[in-house]
């Protein structure tokens, strides 16, 4: 507030403006003066005198009363320099009066130590431009005050202490649109009543709700000019309004002006992005009841039929269907569904409440809408059944085929071992089963906005938080991104930040919840609150618990177990040991066929067992490490070694070092970490620069001498490549043995590994005594290439350049960073290893990242206005990955931007041949 000094709260009646001011006053760290405006203060002298009387008790030295703005300004300027707040409520009562002008003038002369917040049903007619440009104004509107679905849940649970079942909460939030007064009125009308009676009141909200009607009459309709009041009642049959539609309905030519006035006066009228309007649903339902009383049912049905005809003519088909249903014009309903069903299901389902159940069951398009609604709230199995019922309908083959495709896609999230699919959602499901890195590569190759989101989510499932954050931030902001995938990307970004210990993830999770709710994906909005447990194990943990419980009620297994996982991880970060919760979570993911997420849960369970003093903790940790390695989940390995390090109770142990290294590698710094004792040996002989090159083949530069690798065996050189690949991080001996002798005997493999390590040490540091080695060191059961500080590693430089480019919003800076990354990619990773299993995945990952660098370079160059250079960058990328469709498209676009149509056409032809 003090950054701007002035606040403006504009919202309809009953939105909670006064409550907000009271809460703000209670939490303020400075004296607060409160003044509630009344209509008798319309002249400036009365209003200024009232302000002086309110401020005098909190600001020493105020000379009251005031009769002019000059007196007020002098009095405030001469008073004690005490910071204070002035809260002015109900300012709409002084709209277009001398008092309004006086306050505008006073704000211009107010001293910097006075903050002013105005609450009003309509926006004061001040010249706000100066304050907006200077950043001195903080605005809060009705949408900010609206209760979201999860906030409705917290309100009835924590404040009213009368929780509602989840489906009733969702219905209440939808019918009231989060209107604070509507929620309060519902609570007062149902307080202490049984669930069945509360549900009956809930169903009446869309019809004749006498309590709400009385409130709206007294606080909204009373005092309105007859023209505006009659206009509201007469046009309530339109669920979407425009000046032209209302004029045609009413036979007049003033509707556009009246709609603008209703919206400006915050009379529950909202302007939409396309320039049309809508009434708040609670108001519209009560206006409809008034219309029926005035006209009678038959004439009201005629009015709805006329509304349906007008809406249909404007191609606002979902709203037309609602109007025809309300008119009971069933022949028109069936005609509309038969002709335009595909368009209706893609719109707002405003007609669901007024359509007869029998017609719902007969029509495939309507069944499709119901199935999508069930899917959106998380009732996946019920949605699958509804899809099947729609497929049995005898009409509308297009709807039936659409139902079949959506059902198959949904069943992949119900069946534990679904068939593999190569679309974005199919690849995301595959990433939960095993090898998320492979799914990440395939999703990137889709070249679609959705594919980029899945690529980031797969990186998150793998436990690569930094990579995931970079990928998801970029995918979220793609211009063609769908609302649902954008919300998923926002949520993934929040989780990545929270796992990395970045508290801004909490705010990002709340944004994700907002986006998911706007997109109509209720289960995702609900789930978005569970990661808050990672930021605040108390209140955030409660949010995760509520998400889990609600998901259980909705029978949404994925929501249950993901919420439990976040709840458990949050408890671990707080030093707790939620054993039972994590045991159930691991079992739940196993039943879902989500081995990757099971690995996360098993790793967390190992930490919990060790903290609980369970003797099986060590065994569980080793099992989690093996599962994480098999499923390709580095995070599970990090958690497993964290558990083992806590068993050791030695901050300098090998397990502690390995846990710390893995946590840093994965970016899991928000889950608690080991405290590793630094034991750095002297490095005087290594002060000169070392260099390690892995891309295009291993090259090791040691100061002043040849490393002498020609004398060691090929397998010893493979060991060196394995260690170099990890850029100085420890590599467990079992990982090394499995890579060098796949499926071999562990005992002989261990001996062979010792021989290789010894020969490698002799080649790298000839003449050193046993135990004096400083380049290939042992950390417990792990080995690492202990490179001196300042060693140049091409893999590290490549990843740093790529991360710098992805994080930059400046195309000039990102161009340089992407160019450095591409220059460092001198060839594939360790080509001399051929198809060795251990090198395939990182080799492909680096190829994918180099291709992505070429794409990023081209996009940055286009942003800088250099399309020919962008085309050259695309060609560099296509040399690396010839089948990347997105690079081909970008290359064509670059040539077209340069005006080179012939090169664009040739590129299209090359693309056709390359992708055949």
Image (tube, rainbow, N blue to C red):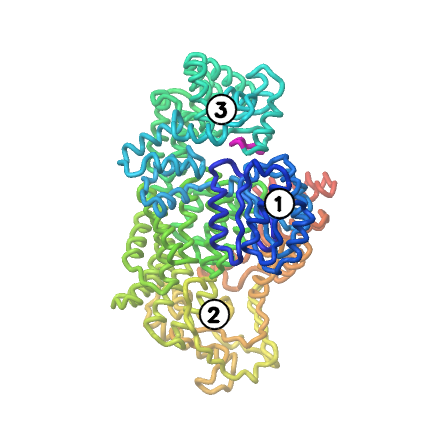
Q: CA distance from mark 3 to mark 1?
A: 49 Å
- Residue 618 sits above or below residue 376 on the image: below
Q: N-terminal of the two: label 1 or label 2?
A: 1
For marks 1 and 2, give the one nearer the viewer.
Answer: 1
Within the image, what quadrant is residue 388 found in?
top left
Q: Position of residue 118 (x, y in %)?
A: 57, 44
- Residue position for label 3: 319
Residue toward you, 730 or 117 = 117
Q: Is residue 272 shown in magenta? A: yes
Q: Position of residue 887 (x, y in %)?
A: 61, 46
In which quadrant of the rendered image does the C terminus lie? top right
Which label is found at residue 484? none
Say whether residue 489 is visible.
no
Percent x, y of residue 150: 41, 44
Query: Closest to the observer: 708 or 165?
Result: 165
The earlier-in-sequence mark between 3 and 1 is 1
Residue receiving disc 1 = 48
**How many labels sit on residues?**
3
Q: Which residue sits furthest right?
A: 899
Residue 348 vertical position relative to residue 833 in the rendered view, above or below: above
Query: Left of 605 or right of it: where is 490?
Result: right
Q: Earlier in the sequence, mark 2 or mark 3?
A: 3
Marker disc for residue 729? 2
Alpha-carbon neighbours of circle 2 within 10 Å: few (<14), some, or many (≥20)? many
Toward the viewer: 177 or 334? 177
Q: Position of residue 550 (x, y in %)?
A: 34, 44
> How far apart are the two marked residues, 2 and 3, measured between alpha carbons?
61 Å
The range drawn in magenta is 267-273
Q: Residues within 10 Å of mark 3 (few under 14, many from 20)?
A: many
**Which circle, 2 or 3, is nearer the viewer?**
3
């Amino acid at each position: 507030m003090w950054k701007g000094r002035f606040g403006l709260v504009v919202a309809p009646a009953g939105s909670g403006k006064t409550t907000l001011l009271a809460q703000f006053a209670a939490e303020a760290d400075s004296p607060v003066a409160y003044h509630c405006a009344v209509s008798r203060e319309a002249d400036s002298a009365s209003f200024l005198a009232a302000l002086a009387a309110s401020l005098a008790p909190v600001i020493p030295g105020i000379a009251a009363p005031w009769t002019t703005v000059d007196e007020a300004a002098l009095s405030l300027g001469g008073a004690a320099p005490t910071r204070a707040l002035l809260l002015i409520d109900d300012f709409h009562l002084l709209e277009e009066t001398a008092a309004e002008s006086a306050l505008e003038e006073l704000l211009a002369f107010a001293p910097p130590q006075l903050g002013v917040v105005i609450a009003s049903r309509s926006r004061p007619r001040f010249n706000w431009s100066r304050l907006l440009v200077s950043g001195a104004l903080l605005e809060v509107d009705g949408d900010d005050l609206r209760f979201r679905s999860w906030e409705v849940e917290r309100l009835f649970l924590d404040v009213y202490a009368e929780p509602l079942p989840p489906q009733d909460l969702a219905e209440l939030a939808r019918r009231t649109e989060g209107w604070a007064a509507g929620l309060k009125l519902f609570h007062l009308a149902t307080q202490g009543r049984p669930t069945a009676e509360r549900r009956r009141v809930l169903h009446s909200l869309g019809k004749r709700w006498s309590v709400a009607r009385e409130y709206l009459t007294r606080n909204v309709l009373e005092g309105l000019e007859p023209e505006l009041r009659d206009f509201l009642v007469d046009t309530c049959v339109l669920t979407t309004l425009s000046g032209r539609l209302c004029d045609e309905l009413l036979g007049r030519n003033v509707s556009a002006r009246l709609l603008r006035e209703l919206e400006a006066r915050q009379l529950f009228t909202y302007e939409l992005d396309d320039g049309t309007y809508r009434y708040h649903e609670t108001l519209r339902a009560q206006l409809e009841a008034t219309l029926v009383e005035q006209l009678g049912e038959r004439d009201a049905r005629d009015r709805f039929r006329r509304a349906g005809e007008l809406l249909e003519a404007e191609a606002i088909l979902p709203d037309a269907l609602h109007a025809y249903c309300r008119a009971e014009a069933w022949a028109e309903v069936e005609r509309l569904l038969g002709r335009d069903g595909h368009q209706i299901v893609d719109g707002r389902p405003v007609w669901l409440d007024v359509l007869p159940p029998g017609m719902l069951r007969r029509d495939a398009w309507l069944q499709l809408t119901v199935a999508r609604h069930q899917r959106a709230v998380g009732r996946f199995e019920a949605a699958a059944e509804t899809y099947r019922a729609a497929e049995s309908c005898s009409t509308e083959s297009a709807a039936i085929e659409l139902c079949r495709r959506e059902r198959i896609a949904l069943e992949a999230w119900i069946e534990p071992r679904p068939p593999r699919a190569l679309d974005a959602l199919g690849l995301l499901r595959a990433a939960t089963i095993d090898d998320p890195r492979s799914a990440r590569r395939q999703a990137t190759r889709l070249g679609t906005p959705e594919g980029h989101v899945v690529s980031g989510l797969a990186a998150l499932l793998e436990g690569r938080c930094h990579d995931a954050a970079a990928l998801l931030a970029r995918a979220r902001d793609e211009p063609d991104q769908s609302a649902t995938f954008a919300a998923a990307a926002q949520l993934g970004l929040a989780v990545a930040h929270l796992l990395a210990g970045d508290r801004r993830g909490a705010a990002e999770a709340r944004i994700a919840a907002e986006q998911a709710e706007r997109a109509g994906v209720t289960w995702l909005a609900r789930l978005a609150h569970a990661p808050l447990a990672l930021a605040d194990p108390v209140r955030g943990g409660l949010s995760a618990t509520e998400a889990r419980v609600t998901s259980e009620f909705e029978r949404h297994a994925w929501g249950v177990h993901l919420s439990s996982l976040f709840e458990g991880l949050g408890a671990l970060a707080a030093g707790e040991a939620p054993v039972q919760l994590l045991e159930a979570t691991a079992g739940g993911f196993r039943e879902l066929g989500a081995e990757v997420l099971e690995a996360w849960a098993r790793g967390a369970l190992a930490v919990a067992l060790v903290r609980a003093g369970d003797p099986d903790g060590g065994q569980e940790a080793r099992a989690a490490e093996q599962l994480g390695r098999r499923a390709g989940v580095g995070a599970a390995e990090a958690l497993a070694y964290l558990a083992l390090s806590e068993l050791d109770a030695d901050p300098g142990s090998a397990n502690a070092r390995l846990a710390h290294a893995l946590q840093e590698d994965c970016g899991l710094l928000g889950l608690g970490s080991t405290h590793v004792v630094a034991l750095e040996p002297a490095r005087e002989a290594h002060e000169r620069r070392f260099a390690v090159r892995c891309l295009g083949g291993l090259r090791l530069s040691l100061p002043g001498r040849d490393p002498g690798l020609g004398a060691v065996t090929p397998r010893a050189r493979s060991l060196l490549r394995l260690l170099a690949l990890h850029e100085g991080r420890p590599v467990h001996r079992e990982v090394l043995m499995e890579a060098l002798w796949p499926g071999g005997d562990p005992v002989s493999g261990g001996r062979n590994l010792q021989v290789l390590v010894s020969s490698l040490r002799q080649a790298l540091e000839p003449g050193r005594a046993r135990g004096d080695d400083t380049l290939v060191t042992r950390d417990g059961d792990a080995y690492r290439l202990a490179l001196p500080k300042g060693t140049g590693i091409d893999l590290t430089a490549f990843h740093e350049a790529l991360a710098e480019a992805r994080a930059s919003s400046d195309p000039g800076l990102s161009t340089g960073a992407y160019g450095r990354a591409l220059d460092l990619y001198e060839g594939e990773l360790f080509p001399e290893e051929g198809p060795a299993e251990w090198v395939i995945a990182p080799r492909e990952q680096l190829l994918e990242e180099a291709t992505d660098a070429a794409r990023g370079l081209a996009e940055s160059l286009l942003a800088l206005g250099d399309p020919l250079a962008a085309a050259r960058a695309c060609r560099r990328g296509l040399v690396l990955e010839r089948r990347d469709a997105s690079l081909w498209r970008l290359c064509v676009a670059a040539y077209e931007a340069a005006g080179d149509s012939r090169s664009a056409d040739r590129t299209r032809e090359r693309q056709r041949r390359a992708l055949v």
